[in-house]
């Protein structure tokens, strides 16, 4: 059955001075890889990068992943107010279009957990045919913002941002992403939904 799903190339970027220099183990890349592996039916080719909080390095990495044909690039780290946190600036610097709804929704979700969510500056942009989204730095917060909030019965209370990703990727000419509904059900208008796989 898996052969009928379109393959997708996804860039995952962990931005951390200390993890990139080996001071501590990076947890961002494994968290992103694990979550995406659970959330998508599509076969995924990951382009993983662990880099320092340097604006030119981040910009160069995002440009390279776009040029390499990634339909989606997810970054983690470097989005707070600290002097070294420059991920949003680098992301906006390479953007063709800004997609502010993603950042607004991530902060709305995170505020259910911590009041300091208002300090996060995540942005999302489109560069050419690539959707680039800055995610929080903590693995738990990554999953929360991607999946959204569910009640004890598993009913969605607040949609996660990933629900909007497949349709956004459609609109910019990327592959047809198919989500695992139990993890995060992607939403498309009826006219954009392809027939279910047999």
Image: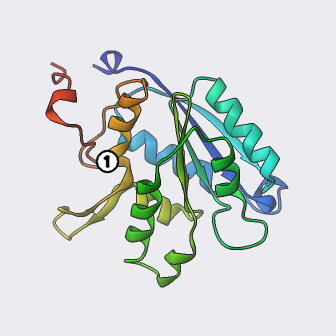
> Relative to residue 26, is residue 185 depicted above or below?
above
- Secondary structure at numbered mark 1: helix
Q: Which residue is mark 1?
A: 163
Q: Is residue 148 left or right of residue 197?
A: right
Point out the residue furthest to the top here. 3
25 or 5, which is in the foreground? 5
> Relative to residue 188, is residue 76 depicted above or below?
below
Q: Which residue is rendered at x = 80% and y = 59% of the image?
A: 17
> Relative to residue 156, is residue 112 depicted above or below?
below
* Quadrant containing the N terminus in the rendered view: top left
* Quadrant containing the C terminus in the rendered view: top left
Q: Which residue is rendered at x = 55% and y = 60% of the image?
A: 122
The residue carrying pointer 1 sits among few (fewer than 14), some (14 to 19) or many (20 or more) residues within 10 Å by Cα, namely many
Q: Which residue is rendered at x = 38% and y = 53% of the image?
A: 161
Q: Which residue is rendered at x = 78% and y = 66% of the image?
A: 84
Point out the residue furthest to the front here. 97
Q: Is residue 190 left or right of residue 101?
A: left
62 or 76, which is in the foreground? 62
């Amino acid at each position: 059955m898996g052969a009928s799903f379109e393959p997708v190339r996804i860039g995952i970027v962990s931005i951390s001075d200390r993890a990139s220099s080996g001071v501590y183990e990076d947890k961002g890349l494994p968290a992103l890889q694990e979550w995406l592996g659970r959330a998508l039916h599509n076969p995924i080719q990951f382009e993983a990068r662990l880099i320092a909080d340097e604006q030119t390095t981040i910009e160069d990495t995002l440009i390279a992943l776009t040029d390499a044909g990634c339909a989606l690039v997810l970054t983690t780290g470097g989005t707070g107010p600290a002097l070294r946190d420059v991920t949003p600036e680098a992301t906006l610097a390479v953007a063709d279009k800004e997609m502010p709804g993603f950042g607004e929704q991530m902060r709305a979700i995170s505020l259910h957990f911590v009041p300091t969510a208002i300090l996060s500056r995540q942005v999302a942009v489109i560069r050419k045919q690539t959707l680039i989204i800055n995610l929080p730095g903590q693995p738990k917060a990554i999953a929360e913002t991607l999946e959204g909030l569910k009640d004890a019965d598993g009913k969605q209370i607040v949609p996660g941002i990933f629900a909007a990703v497949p349709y956004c990727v459609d609109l910019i000419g990327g592959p047809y992403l198919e989500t695992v509904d139990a993890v995060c059900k992607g939403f498309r208008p009826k006219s954009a939904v392809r027939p279910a796989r047999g």
